[in-house]
Image: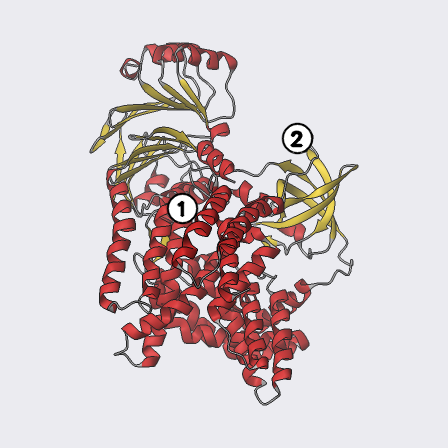
Amino acid sequence: MSRTSGVLLCLAYIMGLLLVPVPGGSYGMLVLGAIAAFSIPRYWRMGPKSGMWLLAGILGFIASFYFSFRTPQPPEIDFSPWIGQPVTVQGKVLSEPQLTRSHRIRFTLKVSQIEDRPVQGKFYTTVPLLQATGLHPGYQVEVRGRLYEPQRSSIPGGFDFRHYLAHQGMFMGLSAETVKFDVNQGSWGWWWVRQRILRSLVQGLDVPEGIVISSMVLGRRAVDLPFDIRDNFIQVGLAHVLAASGFHVSLLLGFVLTLTQRFSKRIQFRVGIITLILYSGLTGFTPSVLRASLMGFGAVLGTLLDRRVNILGSLLLTATVLLLVNPLWIQDVGFQLSFLATLGLVVTVPVLMEIWEGLPPAIASAFAVPVSAFLWTFPLQLYHFAVLSSYGIWVNLVTLPLVVLLTLGGMVVASMAVIWPLLGSWVSSVLYYPTVAFLAIIDGFTELPGNSVAVGKISALQLLVLYGVILLFWVKGRVPIKSKILLGMGIGLAIAVVVIPLWYTQAYRSQVTVFATRTPAIAIQDRGKVVLVNTPDFGVAQYTLIPFFQSQGVNELDAGVMLNGGNAPIEGWLRILDTLPIRRFYQIGDLVEQVEQKIEERVETYQLLQVNQGLNWKTLSIEGLSLDPQVLGFELENKRFLMLEGRGFTGAFCEVQSWCNDYAGETVLIWSGKGMALEMIEKIQPEVAIALSEDLDPAILSALKATNSTVFLTGRDGAVQWNSQRGFSTTADVQARNDFAL
């Protein structure tokens, strides 16, 4: 088989896996293979023959079925009788216990028994912090808690936690209160080495410096780094420093080969291979480290055999081998970013070096490396996260010397700590001041305005077009076209396919989103203006509202509206303000000084509104209609919405309220799903009813059907969204399309 045919088959296999989410994608590979077999050999006579093109199509077709075969399936046992009930579960801890944002410990539990019944499966398990002290992978435990089904995304297009766990073979969650285990079980594994390194570094550098260095050496998956520090690294664009990746492997392998350069090539090869195996184990055999380790193996093997390694070919072969081992990694974001960053360095750095040929080589190289990595990864970041670090390239340039020093120094100290922890602690003290300076630089950048910008998620089509634009930099070296012209074309196309659609969507979007929360929380977007009505608590703000606004490209709220501030929690508003500025804040109800003091100092305008006092923006109007019980009415693009919170919505209550007549008829009714009298339904006769519950009272449901109302239940359908152009849609609709595609 020729090299070209090998490349073709590898690409066909990877393409088959990438097309799994596309309806009919597997059969599309067969069609593409047949078309290529019929047409391409006529024009490319020196290339692969017709049979090889057809084989490539068949291989891509088989890849999709291999992906389905390797996808974990739910166990045959029915867990529904145990859901929500206190149960005793026995099993084995599979993963390193780590702290969650809710200050509980999470780990993967391989279950062997529930109550007295033998069971096979894996549970996502969380336990109280103090209950997990001394718990390690490999321990046999007895856990007492309640089973639950992991939640799906609460917002359209948001992170689907259930889908994420299912791809790891976990279909149930276990919220435990007690854990029993024998601390003298004698389990040993990679975790023991990691703990030895971590303790030595913390003893020598204290907290948080010791934990940061440990994470820079072993990766944040192996080290439980505090969330505030982790968030700062992500915010300024240094997340890769805390994730064991190709940078760490190449740095370590280069250092080891330099130390052993006086020895024979055979000894260098053996030491290099041992180093790669040990480091892969210490970091948890993550996809990015395995990718770098396999490529490192090819490099040291090439040195041993005195053969030059084709980096692009090595990268393609490595991707194929890893995806043969685990095809599900094709959907792992870390795997994708690792390969794209490496590809960018290989194909784009030479082009940028030629463009900047007037600069000194050292300076040009210092700029070319981070710019190349950024160019090849930022489309994927937009697709998955919708957020960019404004100063990412500059932060990487400024901190590069410290990152190299601390990472390499930490690796040296870690190797000492494994042999003699006390020696590792003594030597690690040398890294204290560089670490303090490094963290100070990161803190300084986090304080700069606009350090993190939400630009909105891009579509899969925009993603493909962006990577087509980026490929122009590679084409430059293969066709006679001037660099400046190519660069201008690239920038112009990028603006055309990404910036203009995102700007247009945000500027002309008229949309209302009712979130799947117990009490109403509503986001209103009116042609560039964004208003948030109520935010129930800290958790909803952290895990639902902030991710939603980031996915929409929202970087500030024009207004926040809170009903009845005396009884409503404000922790959610304070969390929103930590991330998104709010220009004007309106409280409808009685003034509460504590609420006013905490909110007023953090917004441009704080105003108390009386009932029936209205607010107006462009095509949006809002007014508080009642405080006891709470009623809010608003209209957007001539679409009327009525939000009811609490109980007491009787027919008598509606008879004395003038707004009942104003909002009767073509209205969208939003309420908890309870505390609503039939007379109220008959009076309003809503066009659409959105209940913040999983079910409705049969009498209420019958009354709504009698008025021909369309009914949504957020407990069943997820968030409900109305768009002036697309009408109503739900999170469940989006998830159903994704499930069908998979």
Kindly identify the amino acid type of the residue bearing the numbered disc 1.
Arg
Q: Which residue is the site of mark 1?
A: 575
Q: Identify which residue, 59 or 402, lies in the foreground.
A: 59
Image marks 2 and 1: residues in contact by CB distance under 8 Å: no
Residue 669 x %, y %: 37, 21
Residue 227 x %, y %: 49, 56
Which image quadrant is residue 259 in?
bottom right
Residue at x 51% of width, y 14% of height: 698
**Snapshot colouring:** secondary structure
Q: Which one is earlier in the sequence, the residue at label 2 or at label 1?
A: 2
Residue 161 x %, y %: 53, 43
Which image quadrant is residue 533 in?
top left
Q: Identify which residue, 675 or 387, lies in the foreground.
A: 387
Residue 208, placed above or below residue 22 = below
Kindly identify the amino acid type of the residue bearing the numbered disc 2.
Ser
Q: Which residue is the site of mark 2?
A: 80
- Using residue 78 as the reference point, say whether residue 666 is left or right of it: left
